[in-house]
Image (spheres, rainbow, N blue to C red):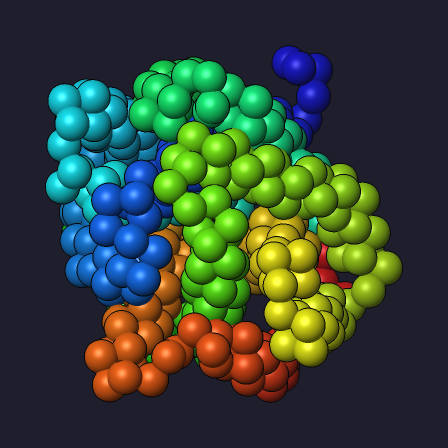
Amino acid sequence: MLKLPKEYQVGLLMACAAFFTLAGYEFVRSPATVLFKNAYGAENLPLVMAAMPLVVFGGVALYGWMLGHLGPRRTLLATSLGSGMLIFVCYLALLSGSKIVTPILFLTKELYIVLLIEQYWSYINSSLSPRTAKKLNGPITGIAGLGGVLGAKLVAVSAESLGAETMLFAAALLLIPATFVSNLTFRMHGEPHPLIVEEEYKSPHMGWKLFKQSNTLSSLLIIVLATQTIAVLLDFKFQMLVTSEYLDQTNSETSFQGNFWGNVNLVSLIFQFIGAPLLLSFLTLRLVHLLLPLAHIVAIGIAIAEPNIFTVGMALLLFKAFDYSIFRAAKELLYVPMEFDARYRAKQIIDVFCYRTAKGGSSLLIAIIHKTGLVMSNYYLMAGFAVTFFWLLLVFPLTKKINTNQD
């Protein structure tokens, strides 16, 4: 590995860190969702998600403060170890029979994964040139995605025998090698620094002012809000169908969910290793961004015509697979030529705060609509279709100033 160019070393090492992190995430994703539904019911998923904006705002604000005072390396180190400890504490609480810890665990798994993964990408975007990023972004997400496949499939085969709670211990444990590898990368290749004076660098601001200066950042923020609203609508519809199928079967449902997310990650790998590199090499970035919402319009349209676990699950699977692969690779290319604060501060606002706030905000709206007596679950797919069309329109201002010939 030492003979590889520096950019390739950074990409490989950070991909390995993401491998362990995503493997661990699969050990907490399915159990956290199933345990919450068993404790409070699937109909209350919108309520717990409604708390997400406050939780994520606090997390991103703390991240901004830590970045200004600790720098990128120590901030990633602290958030990685802190996430592992929090998951482990939730595991111990569940062993003692605690019910109130299930919403805490649910919100924790929603926050920690994006906070860590986006820090990995901030470092990658600070280390790779646009030319190299076009070649490596797909394979980087692919190596990371292998962890997701492995973790999800292990949950599928072990949840029924070991129990949903035991999965959480593995999630906390896997953050140890992830922390070691990511910290090693910083030690080997150094920390990125902004092209500003030291006093400004140490300022713990979150980066909101950057959106007034960049139309690309503003458009990207709105697109992320739209895409994650679609994710919520598809996921809620899917979870309701799965709950009806696996009523009062905690470990069996955990196994089913693990297998489903394993299939999501498996499909993602195909797009990460093959689809993303080919599309980004032979198509313009604007066209790639346009093709994504068009594909989802077709998938959601099929689910609307025949709504069942298979069609809704397929629409959700494709959405997540594209989100983890092609959309991720194409989106990260927009950050590469930007300055430090855009890559480290504005990116966290977009890909952590807005990513999860969209889920929380749309969930709150759904919960309010439910209170009026309207059965919102009947309209999840139609609403998702409408938001996807809105996403398609947003691509034009996002890519208006992209120089498609830029290396």
* Residue, far right: 282
Q: Observer-nearest residue: 67 or 91?
A: 91
Asked if residue 170 lies left or right of residue 14, the reply is: left
- Which picture quadrant has residue 43? bottom left
Q: Is residue 163 above or below residue 286?
A: above
Residue found 62% across the figure and 69% down from its top: 307
Please state the horizontal and vertical placement of residue 47, each as a whole percent of the image: 24, 63
Quadrant of the frame with the C terminus: bottom right
- In-front residue for pair 360/242: 242
**Image location of residue 167, percent across then percent down:** 39, 24
Quarter of the rendering occupied by the N terminus: top right
For this view, does 68 lie left or right of residue 145?
Answer: left
Q: What residue lies at 69% left-to-right and 21% top-to-bottom?
A: 4
Question: Which sits in the foreground, 148 or 232?
Answer: 232
As displayed, is residue 135 above or below residue 292?
A: above
Position of residue 129 relative to residue 4, above or below, is: below
Can the viewer see residue 331 in this picture? yes
- Toward which corner of the image does residue 180 lie, by quadrant? top left
Tell me residue 212's x, y (percent). 34, 78
Q: Number of callouts in the render?
A: 0
Identify the residue shown where x is 38% and y is 27%: 164
Above or below — where is 227 with respect to 121?
Answer: below
Residue 104 screen position, x and y as percent: 20, 43
Please indicate, yes or no, whether residue 129 appears anywhere in the rendered image: no
Residue drawn at x 59%, y 49% as measured from the top left:
324
| In this picture, residue 329 sits left or right of residue 282 | left
